[in-house]
């Protein structure tokens, strides 16, 4: 029997950096296409909320101990960590798939 004690749903928390990246991206989209921004916002918030129930639904991340959720129907990627002991999913970055990724020391 597995000794892990997972209590679902996990709490999903955004880092200040990730939240700012998300707000900046939505503002950028909304400047030219307000309706598209609303639709993408709904898609992204729904996908991120599902991480609370399915924390491993994203692929293994480029940085060790992270995961990446490619948000279907959008160009965005949510980078997150799972903190099993705390029962948390921590969103640490919000990136456009075409942008150059920040350098991270592993």
Image (cartoon, rainbow, N blue to C red):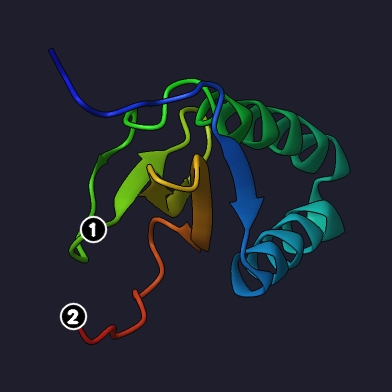
Residue 76 sits above or below residue 64 on the image: above
In the displayed orientation, state which residue is furthest to the top: 1
Give the Cα separation between the discs numbered 2 and 1: 9 Å
**Left or right: 19, with 64 as reference point:** right
Determine the residue positioned at 30% across, 48% down. Answer: 67
Q: Secondary structure at mark 2?
A: loop
Give percent across and percent down for residue 63.
21, 66
Residue 37 sits above or below residue 31 on the image: above
Rate crowding at label 2 as few (under 14), some (14 to 19) or many (20 or more) other CA atoms within 10 Å.
few
Determine the residue positioned at 85% across, 60% down. Answer: 31
Give percent across and percent down for residue 68.
34, 47
Determine the residue positioned at 62% across, 30% down. Answer: 49
Q: Which mark is residue 106?
A: 2
Image quadrant in which you'd find residue 38: top right
Rate crowding at label 1 as few (under 14), some (14 to 19) or many (20 or more) other CA atoms within 10 Å.
few
Q: Quadrant of the N terminus?
A: top left
Image quadrant in which you'd find residue 106: bottom left
Q: Secondary structure at mark 1?
A: loop
Q: Which mark is residue 48?
A: none
User: Are circles 2 and 1 on residues that touch, CB within 8 Å?
Assistant: no
Is residue 94 visible in the rendered image? The answer is: no
Determine the residue positioned at 41% across, 69% down. Answer: 99
Is residue 50 visible in the rendered image? The answer is: yes
Give the labeled residue for mark 1. 65
In the displayed orientation, state which residue is furthest to the left: 1
**Left or right: 23, with 73 as reference point:** right
**Left or right: 102, with 95 as reference point:** left
Observer-nearest residue: 56 or 78? 56
């Amino acid at each position: 029997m597995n000794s892990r004690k997972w209590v679902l749903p996990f709490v999903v928390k955004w880092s200040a950096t990730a939240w700012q990246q998300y707000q900046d991206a939505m503002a950028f989209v909304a400047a030219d296409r307000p309706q598209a921004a609303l639709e993408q916002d709904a898609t992204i918030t729904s996908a991120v909320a599902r991480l609370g129930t399915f924390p491993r639904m994203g692929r293994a991340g480029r940085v060790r101990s992270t995961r990446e959720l490619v948000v279907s129907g959008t160009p965005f990627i949510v980078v997150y960590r799972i903190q099993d002991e705390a029962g948390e999913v921590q969103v640490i970055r919000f990136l456009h798939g075409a942008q150059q990724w920040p350098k991270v020391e592993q």
